[in-house]
Amino acid sequence: MTVVVPEDFPRLPVGGALSGMQLKFSLTRGPDSRFHEPGSLPEERAEDFLRCCEVVEWAAGFLREKALKPKYAALTTEQMLDKFRVNLHRDFDMPESYRIWILTRLADRISQR
């Protein structure tokens, strides 16, 4: 199954610390025996994309259930997202660019309610 990752899905910044005076590149060897930036292989991006989509789907259902409870019924969509933003940061270990992408998608999903 081929997963098409949309262009707006964030790319992870290449990071790495290599000692020495000469210019170095942080690369990893892929399954095709070619060198790639870590996290840039299509399979890795597709896996990250699918994981983020799962979080969006789960969170949309979770927030819809919360909105039905009297305690949360009076909250606006923005207030619900603000509360979820704190939980997303605390409970999910992922890059900040992924969190921003998830919150953007989630805002689109729950604003349709």
Image (cartoon, rainbow, N blue to C red):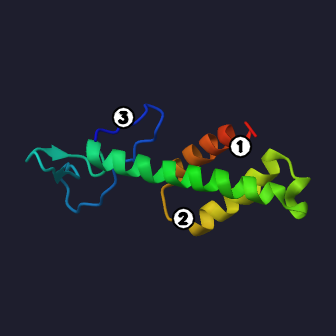
The residues tagged by marks 2 and 3 sit, at their Cα atoms, a distance apart of 24 Å
Q: Residue furthest left?
A: 33
Residue 80, given in percent of the width and then of the height, sits at 78, 53
Q: Earlier in the sequence, mark 2 or mark 1?
A: 2
Q: Which residue type does callout 2 highlight?
A: Phe
Tag 3 residue: 4
Circle 1 SS class: helix
Q: Earlier in the sequence, mark 3 or mark 1?
A: 3
Image mark for residue 67:
none
Q: Nearer the viewer, residue 8 or 111?
A: 111
Q: Earlier in the sequence, mark 2 or mark 3?
A: 3
Circle 3 SS class: loop
Q: Tell me which corner region of the image, top left, top right, bottom left or bottom right, holds residue 70.
A: bottom right
Q: Which residue type does callout 1 highlight?
A: Ile
Side (left or right) of 51 relative to 42: right
Tag 2 residue: 92
Q: Residue at x 39, y 47 (%)?
A: 13
The residues tagged by marks 2 and 1 sit, at their Cα atoms, a distance apart of 20 Å
